[in-house]
Amino acid sequence: MPCTFTPAFCRIDLAALRRNFRRLGPPQELMPVIKSDAYGHGLLPVAAALADAGALRFAVGTASEGLALRRAGFGQEIVPLMGCLTREDWRTAVASGLTPLIAGFDDIEAAAAAASACGAGVVPVALKCDSGMGRLGFTPDEAPELAERLRAHPALAPRFALSHLSSVDMPDEDAYTDMQAGRFGRFLEALRDIFPGILPSLGNSAATVGPARAQSGICRPGLALYGGNPFAATGREPLGEGLEWAMSVAAPILAVHPLRAGESLSYGRIFTAPRDMRVAVAAAGYATGYARALSGRVSLLVRGRRAPQVGRVCMSMLMLDVSHLPDAAAGDLAWVLGGPAEPGERPVDAQELAQLLDTIPYEVLCLMGGLNPRVYA
């Protein structure tokens, strides 16, 4: 019997994931991002679902993730977006047939050395441009030197030119996005003089479903792939049909008991019953990704209806006011994310929790998907 620390579980709807992928455009225009264990959805199951949907390439975080895909039998092009940190990383990338990232001049020598050590013929590489994100990559002014340095290493074949947009999900930053697209265009133009077949990849989720699509080349959707709207709360509507959240999280109710008016519950006694109530105890808490800062601020779905969370969220338990749900009982499921809703009710989603926590849904998905046992549908 496996050792688990929670009876809560994370349900991943792979059919929804495939539908999202198809909504985002034809496979040849996409490089789905499945880094960080596919944003908590599970690297290998997600890769398999996307491969079934026609994915031709994947973006991962590390060479190790790429190796895991190769060992599982995936033959798609694979780009590790964080690059290679060690000699072992470079050799892993080359020996596994990945498309390693070149983000600095030293990377050229490291990639060439790995190609030689592995007896590789021609190694495809991805060239990173810093168009305004301020993280990794070459500036457009460095592109001519980059091209000349690469010509000295015929074993390295530039396959992609990549950059990343910092603020494309913010409509009031459209001018900065245009500036980044212009810088990337200059970088690409300088490279194409020598490597005419190099493929551009600029767009993330917001570019994939927004007006920057036309400037984006091969798009690398992440959040949108898993169902999130990158323009949530901005007033800008995403292009295409509605996306579906692929992740839902449920926890069993352990007990239901009365709480009399004037009685308190949980740590710190931050909640005192204003009336006689029925309280349910559900097996979710901050150890399963439900932040303590959410205490008393959101509801969960129970029997298809929202039930307010009351009192301090604990490590592995939280309490719900189910006074309006007379049939709620131990063994029922409390849905932290998603779940079946009655007409007129709306499930909690990662965007709602992120707004309450002043963060982004990426963080919610990564935490809940990584901390709860996953089941696939």
Image (cartoon, rainbow, N blue to C red):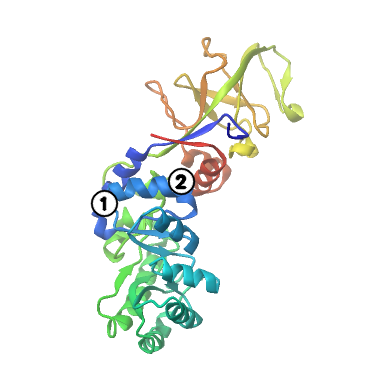
- Can I make out residue 184 in this image? yes
Q: What residue sits 54% from the left and 41% below the top?
A: 368
Identified by mark 2, the residue type is: Gly
Measured as percent of width and height from the top left, residue 215 is found at: 29, 66
Left or right: residue 105 versus residue 6 is: left
Q: In which quarter of the image is the C terminus?
A: top left
Identified by mark 1, the residue type is: Gly
The quarter of the displayed image where residue 181 is located: bottom left
- Give the residue pinned by disc 1: 54
Q: Earlier in the sequence, mark 1 or mark 2?
A: 2
Q: What residue sits 55% from the left and 40% below the top?
A: 356
Measured as percent of width and height from the top left, residue 333 is found at: 51, 23
* Foreground residue among 292 and 145: 145
* Foreground residue among 69 and 12: 69
Within-10-Å neighbours for mark 2: few <14, some 14–19, many 20+ = many
- Give the residue pinned by disc 2: 42
Q: What residue sits 57% from the left and 43% below the top?
A: 357
